Every structure is written in C-alpha cells, then in structure tokens.
Amino acid sequence: MKLTREGFERLQKTLEQEQARLTEATRILQEQMETSSDTEDTGLEDAKREKMNIEARIDELEDTLARATVIEDHENEGRVELGAIVMLSNETTKKDMKVQVVSAPEATVTGGSLPRVSEDSPVGKELMGRRKGDAFVVNLDNGKQMKYKVKSIEY
C-alpha cells in the first residue's frame, strides 16, 4: 500500500498516541481488577473492552505501516496518482476545490491542511490517471451526477 510521506508520519503519530492510550487503559483495568469484588462489574467489562479496542487499532496501524511504501517518485508526471494535489473545478457549482489523492487508510487519518480524497471513493476512482484539462463525470449514490475538470496537478 502506498502512502504519502505526510500520511506515513501522521499514522506513526497516531500509533504513538494509541500506545499511550493502551498504557493508560491497562493501568485502569488493573485498578478495576484490584477494586472489583463483583465478577459482573460493568466498569471492569468496559475497561477490558476499551483495552481490546485499542489493541486492535494498534495492530491495524502497525500492519498498515509495516506494509506501506512511501511515495517518493512520481513516474507519471502530468497524471493524477497517489499523493497528487489536484485543483478541481466543479463544473456543476462553478467552484474550485483543492484535494490530495491518497490511499484509503490514509484518507481516514485526521489532520493535514488539505481535504483528502481516497483512491477508492467515486471521485478518487475517476481522478486516477487523469491529466490537466480532463473533464469527468462522477455518479453519486443519490443518482445525481457531478462534473469535474482537472485544473492543475502538483506533487
């Protein structure tokens, strides 16, 4: 899976935050176990569930980072690919918007200065491989269509 340098660093930072949360959740769970006399204590169950959720998130992040390749070179200069910052003109609303095309896991990470479009999204799928000046139509879930034009591509 390909990630931008910024996305890779954001995922690493998120992983560090989750690891800190896990340490805290483990401490809370131990406290709950020491103070709990009742086996059906909801606080204890909540603490266990929270710890499991954080562990699952950490596994997912570690897996993503382990398999990730950071996009450095753009062999398709002039075409939209992962990491591209694209100025799109919405031909329907006559508004311009600047977006960055990223992989699906990166699209879910918060932060960063630009709106991100996942390569798996309807707009992302249509954008991949396009050149400056290309116009394309995206079919939305509600049956409507949006027409876009690529105004510029930068990396």
Image: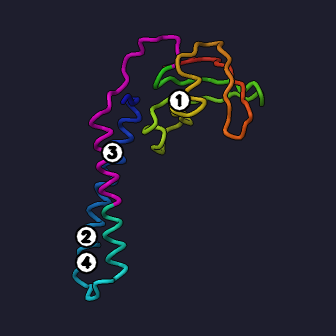
Please report the residue visible at 60 percent of the width from the left and 17 percent of the height from the top: 152
25 horizontally vs 98: left or right: left
Q: Residue 29 in the image: x percent, y percent?
A: 27, 72
Q: Name the amino acid type tagged 3.
A: Leu
Q: Which residue is mark 3?
A: 61
In the image, residue 104 sits, relative to residue 71, either above or below, namely below
Looking at the rendered structure, the kind of residue marked 4 is Glu
Which residue is disc 4 drawn over?
31
Under circle 4, the secondary element is helix
**Residue identified by numbered label 2:** 27
Q: Position of residue 134 (x, y in %)?
A: 65, 14
Confirm or deny contact between disc 2 and disc 4 (CB under 8 A): yes
N-terminal of the pair, mark 4 or mark 3, is 4
Please tell me which of labels 4 and 1 falls first in the chain: 4
Label 1: state its secondary structure. strand
Decide which of 32, 140 is in the foreground and name it.
140
Task: Tell me which label, 1 or 3, sits earlier in the chain.
Answer: 3
Callout 3: helix, strand or loop?
A: helix
Question: Is mark 4 in CB contact (under 8 Å) with mark 1?
Answer: no
| Magenta span of residues | 53-80
Q: Which mark is residue 100?
A: 1
